Image (cartoon, helix red, strand yellow):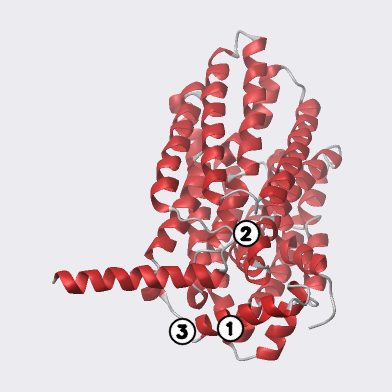
Amino acid sequence: MRKVSTGFVYFFGALGGLLFGYDTGVISGAILFIQKQMNLGSWQQGWVVSAVLLGAILGAAIIGPSSDRYGRRKLLLLSAIIFFIGALGSAFSPEFWTLIVSRIILGMAVGAASALIPTYLAELSPADKRGTVSSLFQLMVMTGILLAYITNYSFSGMYSGWRWMLGFAAIPAALLFLGGLILPESPRFLVKTGHMDQAREVLETMNKHDEAAVNKEVSQIQESAKIVSGGWSELFGKMVRPSLIIGLGLAIFQQVMGCNTVLYYAPTIFTDVGFGVNAALLAHIGIGVFNVIVTAIAVAIMDKIDRKKMLNIGAVGMGISLFVMSLGMKFSGGSQTAAVISVIALTIYIAFFSATWGPVMWVMIGEVFPLNIRGLGNSFASVINWTANMIVSLTFPSLLDFFGTGSLFIGYGVLCFVSIWFVQKKVFETRNRSLEDIEATLREKADEKAATLSTTK
């Protein structure tokens, strides 16, 4: 392992999150110009926006599980290459179908990053810092979204501005690749593949040469690594079932609570209040800055507050904010005050999401799966998350027409409170526990259930 600082490792390890955020956020501004220059209908516009989501499902499904076989670092480098190709392909697309294919390629990198990075960061960081380190991924996502808003505003006055907006992502993609050449491999993967000396070297760097901590971690990883790599049968087996329920449940709830629809609808709310288009874009940047600040605070407190408590506090805050926003929208047509209340409620909603469900979901899916199927488990949870994202995004316009703004967001608010029941009943706490301790607990509980069943027969 090359001599690099832990800060370098964490920064470049999480950098794929910036590309994730940028490439999903930039299209909100770019589509306004693409639509005019390519004469796109509503169906074609929908595909330009959703192509990344389709690609993300494919990337999470194909590239994510491969990390169990080829290593986290190699697949991270591959993702950087795909990001670069997809960004330049999108920027230079001469017509609709080339743009769609390029956006799907770009989405594959986004999906791969969402499956790889939480696993990679969780496996590199010590137990008492894992929440903070893993949530850097979400901070990078929010920073990428903010960068997309700023880029959209900066190039909005140019005729070919949308090409610059989409192509700009090639720069951080190149940085990710260069940084990835120096990044270490996950110590868990190194132990599993028999590279003990390299694994110990990485752990010494990440644990600041605390020999006692390194020895303890190495012995725990060796025990886990003795278990043969599993596949789909083990992922859906009894031992992993609690982890699978957590991964899928958190992945679905994060989307059906309306996070992306609220972000998509933000510019419309600002224009409804009376902002001009430029002012609305600037206000959008303001929300992006606020998002990054709140996420940074969440990163700082992630290992000081239980994950379950953060999820529940977030769900309550988001649910109440959506109810208030819905009421404000019902009366915003005839009341400036009601419209302003809607904007304030929207901002509070985003703050609660960015501080809780945004980062905590990604942290936990990187923690709960056993080592021998961690890549597969994270990949599957990411596929479900992106599928839920795509379904919610595609159904939002139709639901909005059917229910209206006032009623639709109440439905998302109700789902926020349903998520509290799920967290209380199905989610176990992971804060300050080593990955091997979490895995050992899963095996103990599975053995206890098997023993109970055998005695009752």
Compared to 149, does 248 lie above or below? below
Residue at position x 57%, y 27% in the image: 321
Closer mark to the observer between disc 1 and disc 3: 1
Dot 3 amino acid type: Ile
Report which residue position mark 3 lands on. Answer: 227
Q: CA distance from mark 1 to mark 2?
A: 38 Å
* Near-viewer residue (32 or 116): 116
Pointer 1 or 3: first along the chain: 1
| The furthest residue to the left | 457
Residue 324, image x, y percentages: 55, 21
Tell me the tag on residue 219: 1
Give the residue displayed 80% in from the left and 28% down from the top.
278
Q: Against 234, is 194 above or below? A: below
Q: Nearer the viewer, residue 393 or 442?
A: 442
Disc count in the image?
3
Closer to the chain start, of discs 3 and 2, is: 2
Pointer 2 residue: 107
**Quadrant, the C terminus:** bottom left
Residue 262 percent across, percent down from the top left:
59, 34
User: Is residue 412 rendered to the left or right of residue 304?
Assistant: left
